[in-house]
Image: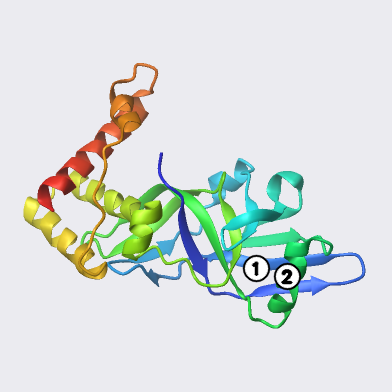
């Protein structure tokens, strides 16, 4: 299964307070606005959340992607919607929650004014020169939208080793090259660009036992076996060329 990735939207937060309600609103993602990922630029497609929102995903509102939830879609205290601008989050906060009380003045002073979201990539496309990636379909179920102190930064060697977010992008790019029957020289050139972006260090792919077994598991669907087999091939090829 793909790991959760994280991206930040620098759009600001809005907190509205009255006698009865305390509401947080903000964009966790914006559409059609390229952002730098180190060795490529990335854009979220306007329809990227259409399918997952239709499936009513279980998403939590967190602080820095951690801790107890401030709100949650399944409880009705958090709602997510997509408009022309991006993924809009709206949360009804509990003013008696000590976590809310801790961040409320910081948001009101604009000391906390950024959001980030956690997701899995279901479908993406790459430009022929592998310099631009478009996220076509994303899965939010089990993920989060977060008020963040610092932007999530997946294009660092620390993030690559700790949660694999960088490696999934690498695997996706390698799969795109494989599907185009790219030469070894083209693959080496891309890996060199990745290595330079990450300060000379790429993660070492690990072939896990569950992934290996899933290729031959009779209870696994043909599509899933094909995806797992392709993923193993990508990792083996990366190991051979590094």
Give the percent coordinates (x, y) of residue 71.
72, 54
Residue 83 visible here = no
Residue 5 shows which numbered tag? none
- Whole-percent x, y for residue 5 in the image: 44, 54
Looking at the rendering, in which quadrant would you find the N terminus? top left
Is label 1 in a helix, a strand or a loop? Answer: strand
Of residues 208 and 88, the one nearer the viewer is 208
**142 on left or right of 212:** right
Above or below, comparing residue 198 to residue 144 in the picture = below
Residue drawn at point x = 35 percent, y = 67 percent:
37
The residue pinned by badge 1 equals 26
Q: Is residue 197 above or below residue 59?
A: below
Rendered position, 124 above or below 20: above
Query: Spatial distance from mark 1 to mark 2, Cα to Cα?
Result: 19 Å
User: Which x, y percent locates residue 103?
Assistant: 70, 71
In the image, is 130 to the left or to the right of 146?
left
């Amino acid at each position: 299964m793909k790991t959760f990735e994280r991206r930040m939207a620098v759009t600001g937060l809005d907190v509205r307070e009255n006698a009865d309600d305390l509401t947080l609103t903000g964009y966790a993602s914006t559409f059609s606005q390229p952002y730098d990922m180190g060795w490529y630029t990335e854009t979220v497609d306007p329809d990227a959340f259409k399918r997952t929102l239709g499936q009513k995903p279980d998403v939590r509102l967190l602080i820095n992607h951690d801790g107890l939830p401030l709100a949650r879609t399944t409880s009705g205290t958090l709602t997510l919607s997509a408009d022309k601008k991006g993924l809009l989050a709206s949360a009804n906060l509990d003013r008696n929650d000590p976590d809310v009380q801790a961040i409320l003045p910081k948001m009101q002073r604009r000391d906390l004014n950024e959001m980030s979201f956690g997701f899995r990539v279901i479908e993406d496309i790459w430009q022929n020169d592998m310099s631009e990636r478009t996220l076509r379909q994303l899965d939010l179920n089990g993920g989060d939208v977060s008020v963040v102190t610092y932007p999530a930064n997946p294009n660092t060697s620390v993030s690559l080793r700790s949660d694999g977010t960088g490696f999934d992008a690498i695997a996706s790019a390698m799969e795109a090259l494989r599907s185009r029957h790219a030469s070894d020289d083209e693959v080496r050139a891309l890996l060199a660009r990745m290595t330079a972006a990450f300060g000379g260090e790429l993660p070492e792919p690990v072939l896990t036992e569950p992934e290996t077994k899933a290729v031959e598991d009779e209870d696994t669907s043909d599509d899933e076996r094909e995806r797992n087999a392709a993923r193993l091939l990508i990792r083996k090829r990366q190991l051979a060329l590094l």
